[in-house]
Image (cartoon, coloured by chain):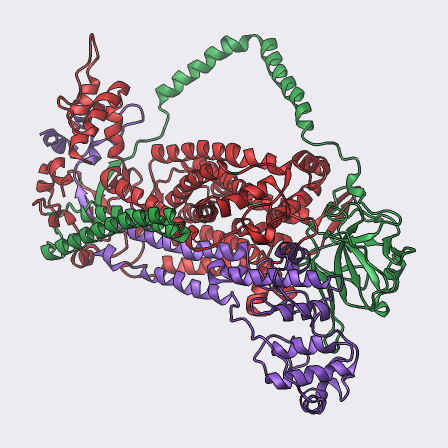
Chain colours: A green, B red, C purple
Amino acid sequence: MTIDERDDAPPAIPEVTQEAIEARAFRVAVAAFVIAVAGGLSAAWGYWSDEDRVLGVGLGVALLGIGFGMVSWSKYLDLDENVVQQRERLRTTVEERDDFAEEIKLTKETVGRRKLLTVLFAGSLASLAVGFIGPIGSLGPKPQGERQRTGWGEGTRLVTSNGQPIPASSQIFDQLATVFPEGSIGVDDGQVVLLRVQPGLLTERTIERGAIEGWVAYSKICTHAGCSVGLFGIDDRKPDTLRQLVCPCHQSVFDPVDSARPIGGPAPRSLPQLALAIDDEGFLVSQSDFDRVVGPISWTEGET
Amino acid sequence: MSDETMSPETAPETEATPAGDGAPEPVFKEDRTLVERYVNNVTGRLGAGAWLTKTLRKVFPSHFSFLWGELALYSFVILVLTGVYLTLFFAGSQDTLTYTGSYAPLQGQEVTSAFNSVMRISFEVKGGLLIRQMHHWAALVFMGAIALHMARIYFTGAYRRPRDLNWYVGLTLLVLALAAGFTGYSLPDDLLSGTGLRITYAIILTIPFIGERLAYLIFGGEWPGTEIIGRLYPVHILIIPGLIVALLALHLGMVWHQKHTQFRGPGRTEDNVVGERVWPSFALKSIGLFFLVAGMITMMGALFTINPIWLYGPYDVGAATSYSQPDWYIGFLEGSLRLMPPWETQIGPIVINNIFYSGVVVSAIIFGGLYTVPYLDRRFTGDRDEHNLLDRPRDAPTRTAIGVACITAVSILFIGGAQDIIAKTFDIAVGRVTTILQISFLVGPPLSFFIARRVCISLRDRPGPRRTERESPVIRTSTGGYEFLEPIDSDGVPVDQRSTSNGNGAGNGAGNGHDAGHVSTDSSGSPREVAEP
Amino acid sequence: MNWRTLGPRSLFVVPVVAAVAVAGLTFFGPTGAGQSAPAATPEFGSRLFDAHCSACHGPVGEGIEGRGPDLRQEGEAAADFVLRTGRMPLANPSAQAIRGPVRFNEEEIVALVEHVGTLGDGPGIPDVNIEGADIGNGANLFLLNCAACHVASGAGAPIGGNRRAPALAQATPTEIGEAILVGPGAMPIFSTFTDTEINDIAAYIEDLNQQGTTDALAFGGAGPAAEGLAAWLLALVPLIALTRWIGHAKPGRNHPRDDTEPPPDDHPGDTPTTAEDAAAEASAPDDGTVEREEVTPG
């Protein structure tokens, strides 16, 4: 039955328009398939002659050509149509329901009669689940406080990524280096951002916590989500001064001259500070490990 | 429907003939074409003749938004095809070795096997970079298509009974797709994927009671460990795709069985489907769309660099790069991490860091909300009926407004995830962008709710001939025809105008002399005649 | 016909516009000019300094509160850097100095640089030579120290306090060496780098520029967010336009037959499998399908 079944039939369409459209769709389809062939061939050529981009574009042209061709083909064949199909009702009939109810009844009378068996069966399945928890536990060791320790300790030298220790005597200020504890370069937890600023800028508590002669070192692991706090903007040239350590992941901002307290962005805690000292040969060393866990905290690690 | 295959008279009849003794009669006496042979030899053995014909004649309503799910489906097909190719080269291991490939700046660096193999795919395998980039672009398109598809389902109310079941399946597919995307992003073990994993580790740590233990279980110990890439690999190439394929089959099977929804229009009722048959028109277009999607993704892969891991280098605990963002679909989490104020809550011995809110709570709210959409709809509208006709967004102003408000909120999170790029592009301080977005997050959703609702109501109540089709009753006559009280077609254009402007009743123009306009001729037209162009 | 008018044709325009917009993110441009060193007299440099610099930096480069910083420890490296990149002279002292048109000719620059060098004992112009440098080491150092602000691709990024790390596409090796030594603007000084390491870094940055890592085809090197935007604008929007073309069917012919199956009161599993069944089933229904069923098999 058709949608247009009614007395006021639509006026007949001029045949010309219809044919013109079909002709155009036909031409488009032909052109598209020809272009697709050309694309496929040029892709093959691109592969043999090591032209990666020709390979890719050729394949793309071939695929797009086929796609355009097929859709145009459908348009050319003038297949658009209005077909009415009735929906099946997705309902359970009364008979079906009764049949099913009978099945349930049967189940209760047979399998369900021995309650003990049912319970034991469920219980044995549960014990199986409990039994398999063990192997899951082998996926990772129990935390043994590794996160509370890093490679830093008393008298550990600060070295750059290629192993050079840092002489404390440098008179250059506003400098930055990424350093590791000597002996564990590139090991996570130990990376530290070492800054040298004008000693007068540092706050008292920063100096108390182990800044020395303008050298100040903070854990490079952001206390927010653990990215490397890599952006150090420092500009002492007046009038527009700036001193910030920024995490490039979520834009947490820390104040490097005031024990890296958070001054912007989502980080709730300051970066742990590494207490510094100078050894006999004039190189920078750490006084001890960090006094707090570095990086993001777990649910047990409240502020002390 | 090609006439050889359909032969509605022969096929079902033969199938229905009891086999009896000896070989059954072949369906086609002379099986010259491939199709005839197929019908004789395959469907004959399966007793699927009736099913086949019925399938080919299944009717799908036409609307461009109904094709967005197909965009996702076809992107997934491309993901599987390109992904299989990549697995032939990828090494899911964090064993370190010295890079000796052809990319000079990284030569001599200690890299993991995983990173090394992706470098090999990108530089040594001819065409490997193309496939890799296609895989990545396809993933981005896949997620976008899913989002569009889901928005269409929501705004037209297609999630209501009986399709609420399929809403849950589709939503689970979205979650799986996100997981697939995230694991895939992490596999190359470059600086960005390492950074992403590190953030994930941090988020897991903050989960009360189980956080630290769970993180150790997943990562095989303290970050970064040497296990995670090897573990994500089977998850990415086997477990998640397997689940996606299974649920996709269920998803499509349910659509097939329940039949597609349709918009209101003349002749369209809750009890029928008006549209195109699968064969040939719908199938030709749909397969054509597959090639178009494939072509578009191939073009993207051929022309545009994506995820240049050689620039990021192998993951290095001390290194960092700006613009370290996840792929766009994880952007809402990135945004919630960036926009969340620095809150830290202490409840007894439990500390809740703000990344627990941004990572776990926000995800739980978003996906929990999405899973409860059908329930909330039933709860607040009291509508438990089956719906096969779709609403236009304006027909349900409150629903639309809620959707718009949620999309506004999530969009602000997405923008927040790229707040540094916004700051750079528009030359505003990052902190100011953050503040603006935080305020917008609070103000934007209610505001957009109000605006969207007003717009819907005024569109719905707009007087004139272009009012919604709902106002245009179609009466089915006793002879099976339809009577139009106020003829309007699916676009809301009065039928008379439509007829003159675009030539309704294309059957006329097809030149078979079949006049669709009259009941008498219509009834006498044989299907064969109509099927022919 | 509807499909030919392609209503959403305008949607095809969007990706093109988007491509231009993305290109706008890319901060591309030619590499800066090389340098030579013609002789200049100290008096000439002094005169230029008085005319163009002393208003903010003071007559002997001691700096003026609220206007310009002390130049006495900045050295030739800093002066050469800011003059050759057009960062100085700067109109607004509270704005960040950014790359601009160079205001002086070669002779004037040399004279000014030498004059600033005489004001104190800051670093001299480094001799950066990227020939034969180890770009592998450069890449390593760049990712560890520079990429955080300047981005792995060299695109540059915003840092705190409304400052931005500039893109590196136009930087010459000498400028890179100078910047590492003097830390212009908000950039810190990287004094731990040796001359060789500076050469390596400069060579790697040159390699990035050769690769075109901040090209439009790489979306300005702005990373996954830009790629995601590109996926939407360049792939998804055209695909939506294509679905509009495909899904926008003409009203189409009205096919008279397919409503015969299944009958309206049918339920699953009970569909007719033969034409006879269908006809038998169809003879019952309420509407006029009977009439049609009779003609169908014929």
In this orientation, which residue lies closer to the viewer: A181 or C240? A181
Q: Is residue C72 left or right of residue B272?
A: right
Measured as percent of width and height from the top left, residue B396 is found at 42, 51
Q: Is residue A8 above or below residue B85?
A: below
Q: Is residue B63 visible?
A: no
Q: Position of residue B285 (x, y in %)?
A: 28, 44
* Outermost residue toward the right in this view: A280
Residue at image location 31% in from the left, 23% down from the top: C269
Q: Is residue C45 left or right of residue B13?
A: right
Residue at 63% x, 59% y is C133
Residue B121 left/right relative to A233: left
Expressed as whole percent of the image width and height from the top left, the position of residue A282 reads: 89, 59
Q: Does any portion of residue B189 appear in the rendered image? A: yes
Task: From this view, report whether residue C272 is shown above or below residue B389.
Answer: above
The answer to which image quadrant residue A166 occupies is bottom right
Q: Is residue C14 above or below residue A224?
A: below
Q: Quadrant of the N terminus of chain B?
A: top left
Quick check: B283 above or below C155?
above
